[in-house]
Amino acid sequence: MSNVKALMSAAIGTLKLFGAKVGAPLFPITVSIFAPVLAEPPSTFTCQVEVFPLDSSARAIYGEGSLQALCLAARHAIQLLATFVEQGGQLSYANGESFDLGSYGFRLLGDS
């Protein structure tokens, strides 16, 4: 974890949602994606992603170049949210409007 924190940069994208399972109260979910940083020269970058509390740890997502690392980190975050929904969870914005996973354009595991 110290290596993850050492490479972590400033958050460049965040998303605040609410999650719920049937019969349970709403709880806040925060997605944060951090700017890619060079992990191993000349071109391996890492991009940190947090989806709290669905995943209790920041994850280092690696890519060949900063754009790939960033895209893979975003896809990882959306996949975690999709898995929560597949397991019976519901996602919504603060105003109660349902969150649409498809609006992010990623083809996720389990999609046909």
Image (cartoon, grey):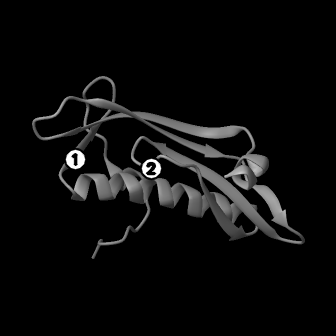
Q: Residues within 10 Å of mark 2 (few under 14, many from 20)?
A: some
Helix, strand or loop status at disc 1: strand
Residue 28, located in which quarter of the rendered image?
top left
Q: How many marks?
A: 2
Residue at 75 percent of width and 43 percent of height: 9
> What's the mark number on residue 55?
2
In this view, 36 is above or below 110: above
Residue at 16 percent of width and 34 percent of height: 24
Residue 85 on image: x %, y %: 25, 52
In this view, 97 is above or below 47: above
Q: Which residue is mark 1?
A: 89
Residue at 36 percent of width and 51 percent of height: 81
Residue 49 on image: x %, y %: 58, 50
Residue 60 on image: x %, y %: 64, 58
Is 103 displayed left or right of 47 in the figure? left
- Out of 2 and 60, give the one closest to the viewer: 2
- Sequence-wise, the earlier of marks 1 and 2 is 2
Amino acid on which the number 1 mark rests in the picture: Gly
Helix, strand or loop status at disc 2: loop
Residue 26, located in which quarter of the rendered image?
top left
Query: Dividing the image into 4 quarters, which one contains the C terminus?
Result: bottom left
* Distance from the alpha carbon under mark 1 to that under mark 2: 15 Å
In this view, 62 is above or below 96: below
Which of the two discs, 1 and 2, sits closer to the camera?
A: 2
